[in-house]
Image: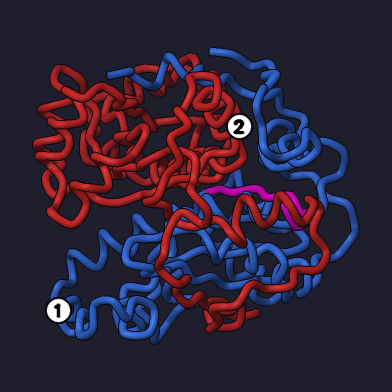
Chain colours: A red, B blue
């Protein structure tokens, strides 16, 4: 394992982008006063939306929490250690997957006409497919936010059922992650970077 | 929804990188004869490894399948529509999460000494945490592969229990995705790009 930055050969993107997206990016909890604009969020989404999902199912949905009133509701549903992080973030995204993602499949995946009707009764399958593909998309979105010049601080809520009731009532959206977003003040954190596995520690060659 | 590429304002990475990582990248099934080197895979991993996971749990593991013998075993476990895709790919990664990821927590997350022992009996929790965080990491890895100049073709196996028995016997690794990797021949696919949601179709502002 290593804590140090790697010197990565053979990249197709420049060093600045590699640092910004991965190598020096940190889970952020310290922000400048700069607001997060709608254009910045759109820029992030307009990259992340292209990431692949199974059958182009695209189940990720999210709330963009800016107002003092909605933020206070969210803070109540966070664990104690994360309450102040939500309070101090310029914007907080509440990520969810749409359990009814299949309703869009005729448009999203025209290769399989009628698949929507096969998915409709398969509730457990939709929970799995929705949740897992939305997590893939969350990975793309975190990278996309950084590509748009923003920093991200992903963390967990204490009560996702409560989050669903507070923010997604009347929908099939199931929340799974909370992400503070803003412009990082300096490195955005005072925590030292934690270790990462090297390639030979996570892979086997066959 | 839209099929067209967006003109994305306000990016912190250059247009070339935005195209390569997201906007023009495609799920690939057509490859050049160029091999995938160990250095290229290391370059991809040495970016993707920095993506955040819950408690730095880093549960993603993978097999790198290159040999004819191992490839044939994998082909047997793929659905008919994906067999030829595995046969023709320069390298195929079999992505899994480590159900025993907690064994590394004392090193990966020293902020919570002893958490390893709390996680040990919580098998169901470890399945969820392992699977979901590995899917986040799969998102980072797909972007990392593109950043290393490679193209990726993610798809599903027909029989993940069979994949685990064939490639991960004696470990706690649970496979969940198969990713062909190589250098794209042209666009890498003849399928037209499928629609994507616009920001206002997936988000609500509060």
Which circle marks residue B85 in the picture? none
Which circle marks residue B118 in the picture? 1
- Is there CB contact under 8 Å for labels 2 and 1? no
Give the magenta-colored segment's residue range.
B146-155
Q: How many marks?
A: 2
Compared to residue B182, the image places residue A31 above or below, namely above
Residue position for label 2: A47
The picture places residue A194, in percent across and down from the top left corner, at: 44, 74
Q: Is residue B98 visible?
A: yes
- Mark 2 and mark 1, same subunit? no
**Camera-side residue: A199 or B180?**
A199
Q: Residue at x 24, y 37 (%)?
A: A175
**Camera-side residue: B78 or A187?**
A187
Q: Was residue B34 drawn as part of the magenta stretch in this picture?
A: no
Q: Residue at x 77, y 67 (%)?
A: B40
Regarding mark 1 in the picture, which secondary structure is present there?
A: helix
Q: Residue at x 25, y 22 (%)?
A: A67
**Camera-side residue: A171 or A64?**
A64
Q: Chain of mark 2?
A: A
- Would residue B68 appear left or right of B101 to someone viewing this image? right
């Amino acid at each position: 394992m290593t804590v140090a930055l790697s010197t990565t050969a053979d990249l197709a993107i420049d060093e600045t982008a590699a640092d910004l997206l991965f190598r020096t990016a940190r889970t952020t909890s310290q922000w400048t006063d700069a607001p997060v604009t709608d254009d910045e969020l759109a820029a992030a989404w307009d990259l992340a939306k292209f990431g692949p999902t199974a059958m182009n199912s695209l189940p990720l949905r999210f709330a963009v929490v800016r107002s003092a009133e909605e933020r206070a509701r969210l803070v109540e549903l966070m664990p104690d250690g994360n309450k102040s992080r939500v309070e101090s973030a310029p914007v907080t995204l509440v990520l969810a997957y749409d359990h009814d993602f299949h309703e869009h499949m005729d448009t999203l995946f025209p290769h399989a006409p009628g698949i929507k009707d096969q998915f409709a009764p398969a509730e457990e399958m939709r929970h799995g497919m929705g949740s897992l593909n939305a997590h893939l998309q969350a990975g793309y979105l975190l990278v996309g936010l950084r590509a748009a010049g923003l920093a991200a601080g992903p963390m967990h809520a204490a009560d996702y059922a409560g989050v669903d009731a507070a923010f997604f009532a009347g929908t099939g959206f199931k929340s799974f992650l909370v992400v503070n977003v803003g412009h990082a003040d300096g490195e955005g954190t005072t925590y030292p970077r934690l270790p990462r596995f090297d390639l030979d520690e996570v892979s086997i060659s066959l």
